Amino acid sequence: EAQVTQNPRYLITVTGKKLTVTCSQNMNHEYMSWYRQDPGLGLRQIYYSMNVEVTDKGDVPEGYKVSRKEKRNFPLILESPSPNQTSLYFCASSSQFRTEAFFGQGTRLTVV
Amino acid sequence: AQTVTQSQPEMSVQEAETVTLSCTYDTSESNYYLFWYKQPPSRQMILVIRQEAYKQQNATENRFSVNFQKAAKSFSLKISDSQLGDTAMYFCAFSSPTQGGSEKLVFGKGTKLTVNP
């Protein structure tokens, strides 16, 4: 089954404790992205990747890091999480034809 | 920069009736895609319908159809014969091949739709 898988689905952590949210896709897609969703703001892009070792900032990249060492994986790293990063996070992937994005199940992150 | 505006934060409709969700966008691009995504309480983002800007014909998917007015930069979603399972948050989204493609979607703030029995 074609899918984008995020882990964990729920995470509660403390301020300053480094964490990684993993994202993996099995569709051999070139393009992958991270979004955060906040009430009243919709989804906003954090980072995206066009291929292995090629990444670029989205609209809200501050406080986040990403890496793309393998085509299938695109982890999101919060080196020093803060409460304002409490949000719902989505990973998405799309093919070279770039006509549709497929989303993971979402990760609910709470930073206390 | 592209922007997407959904002017209806919340809407409700009776089961079996028809409802229309509004979306407007701003862009200087001539070639782009527009999408409606559904997000039920499970949080999963589900693609409802997609429209290519170069196509004059409005896209339809079963009970879902769009009214795409390119000159007015309007992209509304019509849901016919509403069902309880249509209760969800609906997001309008935009992407352009010259501005990142589908890896760079610009979303509206969403419309929460409730279907009442």
Image (cartoon, coloured by chain):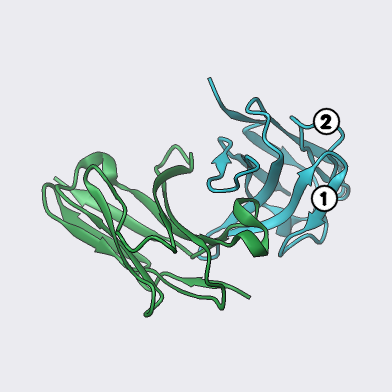
Chain colours: A cyan, B green
Residue pointed to by mark 2: A70
x then y, percent, for residue B44: 48, 39
Q: Where, quadrant-wise, is the C terminus of chain B in this rendering? A: top left
Q: Where, quadrant-wise, is the N terminus of chain B in this rendering? A: bottom right
Of marks 1 and 2, which one's residue comes earlier in the chain? 1
Q: Residue A55 carries which label?
A: 1
Task: Tell me which chain the residue with mark 1 is part of.
Answer: A
Q: Is residue B22 left or right of residue B29?
A: left
Proximity of marks 1 and 2: CB atoms separated by less than 8 Å = no
Check disc 2 and report its element: helix, strand or loop: loop
x then y, percent, for residue A21: 74, 37
Check disc 1 and report its element: helix, strand or loop: strand
- The residue drawn where x is 63% and y is 35% is A10
Q: In this picture, is A33 found above or below B108?
A: above
Please state which amino acid type lies under the numbered disc 2: Glu
Relative to the observer, which residue lies in front, A22 or A15? A22
Give the residue furthest to the top: A1
